[in-house]
Image: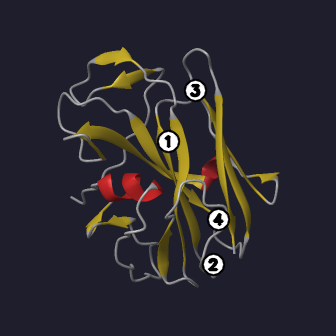
């Protein structure tokens, strides 16, 4: 099983230190790699409550942060990790047959909405959702029995596009229901 240790990428908003480049695969877009470890299991949200790995339920945490974590494409040769909080544009030129975006969402939202060039993307553009738990004060998708899912890595397929403004919005499911948004201009 592939594991994800997201401490480095969660710290990406304050640290320019990034993981090594990933070799592109023609058959399947490579997993997001962080500190030499790749993203693992897919865990889907189940309703409006946080779901622990052992099946117990509790109050779902509201969204406290959304951020574009990485943009990857065949033309760029893999993932480009965003290195500063609020980064507005990719450093690499992206495109080719495969173009993907990963958004980190801390907390629980309702139905996320995405757009490219201001045009809504279909919900099918989100092709993968990995749950995040906290272990040793770090976010990880290597959730163990009894841990609560506190956020998500959301993967979006933009294959066929070469560039444009990607935008993500989601409303927190708990009061006060604040709308959160993030975006990046993909070169």
Q: Nearer the viewer, mark 4 or mark 3?
A: 3
Relative side of 58 to 156, left or right: left
Dot placed on the residue nearer the N-terminal end, 3 or 1: 1
Residue 23 in picture, x, y percent from top left = 39, 83
What residue is at 59 percent from the left and 29 percent from the top? Answer: 110
Residue 19 in picture, x, y percent from top left = 35, 71
Q: Which residue is mark 2?
A: 94
Residue 172 is tagged as 3
Q: Which residue is mark 1?
A: 105
SS label for mark 1: strand
Q: Callout 2: few (<14), some (14-19), or many (20+) C-alpha neighbours within 10 Å?
A: many
Relative side of 141 to 126, left or right: left
Alpha-carbon distance for marks 2 and 4?
Answer: 11 Å
Dot placed on the residue nearer the N-terminal end, 1 or 4: 1
Q: Dividing the image into 4 quarters, which one contains the C terminus?
A: bottom right
Dot placed on the residue nearer the N-terminal end, 1 or 2: 2
Q: Which residue is mark 4?
A: 158
Is residue 40 visible in this depiction of the protein? no
Dot placed on the residue nearer the N-terminal end, 4 or 3: 4
Is residue 183 visible in this depiction of the protein? yes
Q: Is residue 25 above or below residue 100?
A: below
Could you tell me if the residues under marks 1 and 2 are in contact, i.e. CB atoms within 8 Å? no
């Amino acid at each position: 099983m592939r594991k994800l240790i997201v401490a480095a990428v969660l710290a990406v908003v304050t640290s320019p230190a990034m993981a090594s480049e990933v070799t592109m695969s023609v058959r399947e877009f490579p997993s997001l790699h962080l500190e030499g470890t790749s993203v693992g299991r897919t865990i889907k949200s189940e309703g409006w409550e946080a779901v622990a790995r052992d099946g117990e339920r509790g109050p779902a945490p509201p969204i406290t942060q959304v951020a574009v974590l990485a943009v990857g494409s065949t033309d760029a040769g893999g993932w480009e990790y965003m290195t500063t909080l609020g980064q507005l544009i990719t450093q690499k030129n992206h495109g080719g047959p495969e173009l993907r975006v990963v958004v980190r969402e801390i907390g629980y939202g309702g139905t996320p909405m995405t757009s490219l060039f201001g045009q809504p993307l279909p919900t099918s553009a989100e092709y993968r959702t990995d749950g995040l738990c906290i272990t040793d004060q770090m976010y990880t998708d290597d959730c163990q029995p009894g841990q609560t899912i506190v956020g998500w890595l959301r993967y979006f397929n933009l294959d066929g596009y070469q560039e444009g403004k990607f935008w993500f919005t989601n409303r927190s499911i708990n009061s006060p229901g604040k709308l959160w948004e993030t975006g990046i201009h993909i070169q």
